[in-house]
Image (tube, rainbow, N blue to C red):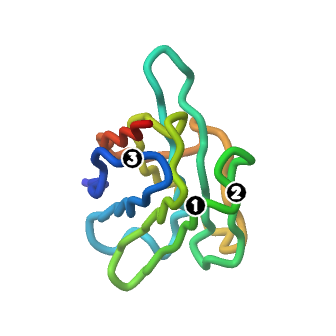
Amino acid sequence: QVQLVESGGGLVQAGGSLRLSCAASGGIFSGYAMGWFRQAPGKERELVSAISWTSTSIYYADSVRGRFTISRDNVKNLVTLQMNSLKPEDTAVYFCAAAQTYLGNTYYLAAGEYDYWGQGTQVTVSS
């Protein structure tokens, strides 16, 4: 049973930083593209960032590019999202997700392409 568990969320003032982590059950990262999604109340779930399983291809949403950084460690089965210069509009529940793939240079943009999901961690940015 594959499990993903997010951590690192919390309350921060605008302009501050948070680092989210996603820990996966053993042995899945080498063969899974990973993504971070977020969902604010009353809004659709949106892709924030994605990374291929070799880390050779990375995607950022326009709204976070230049502020957020995604990285992964396939040995430790961890993926992180470093969030800097946070804005109130970043407030949401953040989810990590894994998409099974044999294409090392590929990331995925659609939620329906992901096979496993964490339960989410709340990020609240105050002004």
Question: Which residue is depicted at the point 43% across and 34% down?
Answer: 92
Determine the residue located farthest toward the bottom in the rendered image: 75
The image quadrant where one finds the C terminus is: top left
Question: Which residue is depicted at the point 69% across and 78% down?
Answer: 56
Label 2 element class: loop
Q: How far apart are marks 1 and 2 (CA)?
A: 6 Å
Asked if labels 3 and 1 touch by Cβ distance under 8 angstroms, the answer is no
- Residue type pointed to by label 1: Phe
Question: Which residue is depicted at the point 54% across and 30% down?
Answer: 45
Q: Distance between the residues labelled 1 and 3?
A: 16 Å
Q: Residue 13 carries which label?
A: 3
Asked if labels 2 and 3 touch by Cβ distance under 8 angstroms, the answer is no
Q: Residue 68 carries which label?
A: 1
Nearest to the observer: residue 81 or residue 75: 81
Residue 28 coordinates in the image, percent (x, y): 39, 68
- Residue type pointed to by label 2: Arg
Query: Mark 1 against mark 3, which lies toward the viewer?
Result: 3
Asked if labels 2 and 1 touch by Cβ distance under 8 angstroms, the answer is yes
- Residue type pointed to by label 3: Gln
Residue 91 coordinates in the image, percent (x, y): 45, 36
Q: Name the residue under label 2.
A: 65
In the image, residue 35 above or below residue 94: below
Residue 88 coordinates in the image, percent (x, y): 49, 36
- For residue 78, which quarter of the picture? bottom left
